[in-house]
Structures are given as structure tokens and as C-alpha cells.
Amino acid sequence: QVQLVESGGGLVRPGGSLKLSCAASGLTLDYYAMGWFRQAPGKEREAVSCASSSGSSTEYVDSVKGRFTISRDNAKNTLYLQMNSLKPEDTAVYYCAALGFLSLGPGDCSIDGVDYWGQGTQVTVSS
């Protein structure tokens, strides 16, 4: 049974930082590109960042470029998202996802490519 369990969410002030983790079980991360997605209240779920199976290729949505960093430790079967300079508009439920391929090509970092979802972790940016 595949499980993706996110942790590290919480309440943070604007300008602050959080680091999300996603621990995987029931699958081996070496064989999956992985991604972080988020869904704000009243909005559709969107891709935030993805990384190829090796981590050598990454993609970010424009709104988080330069502030968020995706990384992975395949030996620990864990995916991370370091979020710096957080803004109120980053408030959302953040989901970890395993994508159905190894590499990361144009357009691959999308909901359409997701094979498995985590349950989500809430991130709230507010003063």
C-alpha cells in the first residue's frame, strides 16, 4: 500500500520559513518524479514544484521561484520543500505527489501526471 505522509506545515508570519517533508512508503522514490502541489480555499489545486527521480531536474511555478526549493533524499525515501520569504498568498493545503514517470519534461509537472497523492498539510501565512 502506497503512503505519502506530509509534515512540517503550520502557521508562520509573512517573511518566515517552513520546511515540508514527505515520507514515502510502499514505493521507491528512485522510480518516480515527485512534486508538491497546493490548493487554496476556493481555488483549484496547482503545481508548485517538481523534481525528476534523481533530483537533477526541477521545475517551479513562477510565483515561488527564488523562494522555494524542492529536494529529495532517495535513500530516506523522502521529499522536501524549503519555503522561504513566505507570503499570505502562499496559504494553502500542500500535497506531496508521486508522478508516473522518471524524468521531467515540459508540462510534466501537473496534476494530470500524478499517480499517488498524500493527505496534505496546512500552511498558513498570516500576521
Image: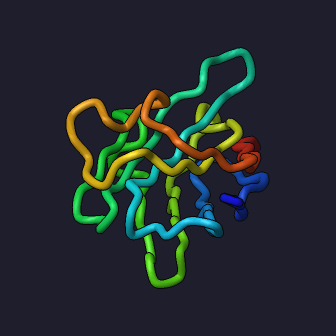
Is residue 45 among what the camera can see?
Answer: yes
Furthest residue toward bottom: 75
Is residue 21 among what the camera can see?
Answer: no
Q: Residue 95: x percent and y percent?
A: 63, 45
Q: Residue 115: x percent and y percent?
A: 53, 42
Q: Is residue 103 above or below residue 24?
A: above
Q: How many marks?
A: 0
Q: Is residue 55 left or right of residue 89?
A: left
The quadrant in which residue 25 appears is bottom right
Furthest residue toward front: 1
Q: Residue 14: x percent and y percent?
A: 63, 47
Q: Residue at x 76, y 43 (%)?
A: 127
Most foreground residue, 14 or 61: 61
Q: Residue at x 46, y 84 (%)?
A: 75
Q: Is residue 66 left or right of residue 84?
A: left
Q: Is residue 49 left or right of residue 3?
A: left
**Coloring scheme used:** rainbow
Q: Residue at x 42, y 45 (%)?
A: 100
Q: Is residue 35 above or below residue 54?
A: above
The quarter of the rendered structure image containing the N terminus is bottom right
The quadrant in which residue 124 appears is top right
Q: Residue 59: x percent and y percent?
A: 30, 45
Q: Residue at x 73, y 56 (%)?
A: 9
The quadrant in which residue 52 appears is bottom left
